[in-house]
Image: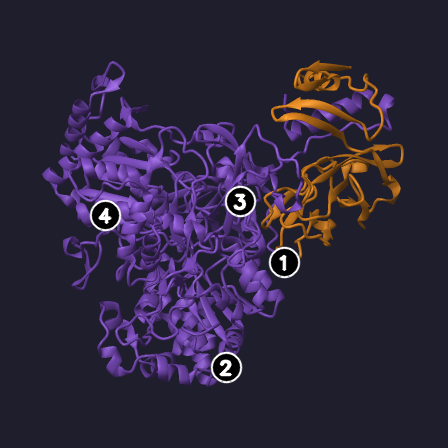
Chain colours: A orange, B purple
Amino acid sequence: MWVDMGAGVYSGRRRLLRVLGRGAVGAGIFGLTAATRDELTPSAHGTEVRRYYPRVRVASIAEVGAEPIAFGYPDEASPCFLVRLDRPAEHGVGPNEAIVAFSRICPHMGCPIERVVVADAQLGPCGCHYSAFDLAFAGRQLQGQSTEDLPQVLLETDDDTVWAVGMRGLVYGRFANVP
Amino acid sequence: MKFTRREFSGLAAAGVAGGCAATQSEPTHVDDTSLPIIPAHAKRVPTACDYCIVGCGYEAITWPVEDRGTDEDPADWYAPAMHTIADVDGRPHHVVVRPDRSSRVVNVGGDFSVRGGTLAQKLYSKDRATRERLTTPLLRVDGELVPIGWDEALEINARVGRYVLDRHGELAWGMKHYSYQYYENTYALTKLALGAVNTPVWAVHDKPAEASDTPGLSDAGVYAFNASYQDWRDAEVIFVSGVSLYDAKSILFQDWVAPGGAKLIVVNPRRDLTASYALANGGLHLQVVPGTDTLLHNAIARQIIEMGGEDAAFIAARTVSAEDLAGEGGFRRAAFGRTYEDYRAFILGRDEHRAEAAAEITGVPAEQIRAAAQMLAAPAKSAFMLEKGNYWSHNVDNTNSFVSLGLLVGAGGAPGRVIGRAGGHQRGMIKGGRYPHDKSPDHYEGHPLALNVDRWVTEGRVRYMWVVGTTWCAAMGATGHLDEVISILTRHTGPQMTSAVMRAGRVDVEAAVDALRAKVDALGMVLVQQDIYANGLSAYADLVFPAAGWGEADFTRMQGERRLRMYSRIADAPGDARPDWWIVAQTAQRMGYEGFDWPDGNAIFEEAAEASVGSPHDYQALVDLARERGESGHEFLRALGTEGVQCPIRRDGDALVGTPRLHDERFFTTSGRAVFMEGSWARVAPVQERIAPRGDELWVTNMRVNALWQSLADDARIPQRIDRYPANVVHIHPADAAARGIATGDWVSLENDSVLNHQGQPHLGRVRAVALVTDSTRRGVMCTYFNYRGDVSQSANCLTDGEVDPMNPVYRYKLARARVVRLGRSEFAETMVRHAPNRV
C-alpha cells in the first residue's frame, strides 16, 4: 500500500479520501488496523504523521441524561463531557439526535468550564472571561472572547452504546488533538 | 489534497456508513488538526491590536512556509484563528499574531478579545476573503472603475485638486478621514488639508465638523483619557455610563475593572453583559430611557448633596472660585461654567431633580436613584466612565452634568478617583496644521464653530472631496439623505468620464483631468476614495486609491491610557497598496506644496513629535533620546515592545518617564482648577420631545456587538464573524414584538418619515434588519448595530437626524425613533436565532 513518492510517502488511504472527496462512497474496504496506527503522508511542509482518533466507548445510551458524564477524549488529558439535550443537535446522536459531547476546556484561555445549561443547550459562561458556547449548534461561540468554537467530540451509536470516534476543532493547548 | 474540517467530517461519516459492519471497532476518523510549529529562527516583532481603544499588546511571528519547527513548546501555542499565510517580501510565510503573554500592562499575561484574537486573519492572503483588498488605483471610466497606474492616478488627483482650489477656492476642496489610524497618516493628511490647503471643509470619521467628543469634560478641564488603567482597578465604585464595557472594551473590563472588584452602576437601556455583571456583583443597572441621562445625573447629584455626600475638601481645593471662573475662556464655559455654590443651587433649585420626578422621565425607579447616590457619595472612592451612549445623545448637557456629578464626589485627579472615557478607537491623531476657524461660516451666537461638512456638501458647495478610511455616509446622521445627494453630485451632475480618455489601454492624464474639470465646472463633485476595501461609497468615487494598513507598514499611536507603541510591519501590502501618508505626500508634492518629501514613516513620526509638545500625546523626549543615541524614533519605540510608554513623556537623564495619570496637580484650565458645568434638562427637554417616539413608534438606539468592529471591513472577511452576522440585527423587547407580530429571525423594516436632513427638512429614513426578540432591551427601545458594513440600507443612522447640537456640531446618533414593520421570514432565521445570553 505504500508508494515511494520521493521526499514523501504516498498513502493508499489518502487516495481513497480523494476519491471520497469527489462523492464516492464505500470506505471500509481497506480494513483499517489498530487504533494507534499511523500513516505517513506528504504535505506542502514535508512528511506528516497521519493520526487516527481512538474509538472509545463512553456510555450506554440509556445512562446519558441531562447530567453531564465526564470522560477524557481523545485521551485522559483532555476533559470532555457527554450530555443529552432537550432538542436535536448538530452532530447529535441517539434518540432525537440529542446526545452530544464536547471538550470542557474553554478555547479562549484554557479555563475549565463548569456550567452546562441543558435548558439553553449552552456551555458557560466560562468563569474566567464569560465565553459561552452553543451545544446544539456544533459548539458555536455564542458570547465572549473565544476566537474558536468549542471542540466537539464526534459520536456514533450502536445498539445501546455511545462511542467517541473523532473531534471537530482543536483542543486548547494542543498542536494536534492526537499527539 | 487538503480537506476542510467540515468536508472531512462529512466524508468520514460517509465512510462509516458504508463500511460500518466491517470496521465497527476500528478508528475511522483522521485527526486533521495540526498547528504549524514555530521554528526557533522565526522572526518576532512587537505590535498592538488595530481595533478598540484598549490596544492590547501582540507579538507577530513570521517564518517561511517551507520551514518547520520541531519543538512543541507549550509556550509557543496559539489558537488556530491567530494564524494565516501571507507574503513577506514576496515569499509565502506562516504568520501568527498572538497576544503578548509576557505583558504586564493592558492585556496582562496575554489576555485577548474575540476581535484582537483574529488579527492575523486581517492580513492580505490570496487564500482568504482578504483577496478582496484594493490592490491598484482605479479611475471611473464609462461608469466602471478601471485600474490605472500610480503616476497617472496621483497626477490626476493633484491637478484636479489644484484646479478646484484655483478656480473655486478652498471652501470647495474638502477632506474627510479617520482620526485614529496612526500618527504618520493623520499628520500627513492634516498637514495637507489644514496646513497646505488650509480648508475648513474638513472633518473626521465620526463627526460632520471639527468638534469635541465630550465638551463637558473639555470645558471642565478634564482630558477624556487622563486616567490610567490602574485607576479603574483602584476604584471602589464606577459609574459606567453608556458603554458596553465587556463587549466593546473587553480587556479593560476583564483585566482591570473586574479584578479591581469595584461595584458598577451601569447606565444603559440594554441589559448587556456588563449590566448583568453589575447586578451579580453588588452593583446597579439603571435601565434608562434613551436621552434622559442629564436628568438622571442631576437627580443623583441632588440626592448626594441632600445627604451631605459631596467631597468638600476636594471641591475647595481643586474646583474653581468665582474669581477663577471669571478668568476662564470659551463660550460654552461662559454659558455653563459654575462654581460649586452655583451648581449646588441649580441642583437643589429645580423641582425635576427630585428622585420621584426624575424617575418618571428617566424610567429609573426613585429607589435606584437613591441607591446610586448612596454608593457614589463621599467618602467612597468613586470613578466615572462614559462613552457614546452618553455623549452621542444630548452631547453638551449630558457631558456637562456627568462631569459635575463626578467632581461633586471628588473624582478627577487622584488614584482610583477619575473621570474619563472608556474610549472607542485608539488615539492616533496629531495635526500637521491648525483648523482655520476664521474661514468657517458656522457659529453659535457669534462664537465660531467649525464648518459642518455634511451640510456644506448637501448644499452643493463642494467640488472635490477626498475621503480616507471611512464609509462617510453610513457613519453620519441622516445617512440616506447624505448618500442620495452625494450620488447626485458625483454620478448625475456634469459630464461623466468616458473611454475617450483611454489611449491604448492607458489613461491620458490630460484628457482625464479635462473631463473632471468639466464635471466640477458643471456643479458636479469629484470624489476620491482611499481605503483598504471598496465599500458603499465606492459607487460614487471617481478615483480610488488602495491603502496599506495595519501590519503592512510601521505605524505609531497611543491607546486608552496614553500608551505609545510601535505597530510593526508584519507582511506585504497587497499589490500596489501604499500607506495613506505616502499617497498624501505624493499628491501634495504634485500640487506644488513643500514639506511633504518624507523618505519614510519615521521621518513623519519624528516631525510630528514637535506638534505633540505640550499635549497629552507629547513624545518629543523619546525622539530626542533616540537621536542622541543615533537611532530612529521608530526603532527606539519598537525596542520598548508592547509596553511602550505612557504619554506625555519626559526625560530623567537617560531614562524616559511616562505619565500614568494627568490631573493629579492641575486640570486643563487657566486656573488649573476644574469647572463645574451645568447640564440642564430644561434645555434638553424640547429636543428630546421632538425626537421621542409617538403613536406606535419605538426608540431606536445603536449598540455594540462584541465580535464586530466598526463597519466590519475585516469582520466581513472572517468566517466566524460573518456567519453569525450575515445581516444587521435589531433587538426588540418581547412585548413590543408580540404587539407587531414579529418573531426572532424575521426581516423587519424600521421607518420614520420625519427624519431631519442636514437642512432641517423632514425626509423618509428606512433601514432593514433581522429581528432578535429579547428581554435584554428595555420595553419601547430597539437596539441595532450602528454601521453594518457601511450599507446604507442597513445603517441605523438613516434614522438619526442630520441636525447637530447647536453648541458643538455633532449628531445625536443614539437617539432615533421608528415604526417597525415585519417584512417576512429572513433567510438567516436559522443562523441568527442564537445569540449572546448576556449573562455572567
Mark 4–mark 3 Cα distance, whole angstroms, equals 45 Å
Of pointers 4 and 3, the one earlier in the residue sequence: 4
Both marks 1 and 2 on one chain:
yes
Is label 2 or label 4 in front? 4
Residue linked to disc 4: B191
Q: Name the residue type under label 2.
A: Pro
Residue shown at 18%/29% (left/top)?
A: B516
Q: Quadrant of the N terminus of chain B?
A: top right
Q: In this view, does B326 lie to the left or right of B238?
A: left
Q: Which mark is first along the chain, 4 or 1?
A: 4
To which residue does mark 3 refer? B771
Question: What number is the disc on residue B840?
Answer: 1
Q: Which of marks 4 and 3 is in front?
A: 4
Residue B455 vs B396, above or below: the answer is: above
Q: Which residue is identified by label 2? A: B379
**For the residues marked 2 and 4, what is the alpha-carbon distance in whole angstroms?**
48 Å
**The disc numbered 2 marks a residue on which chain?**
B
Pair 1/4: label in front: 4
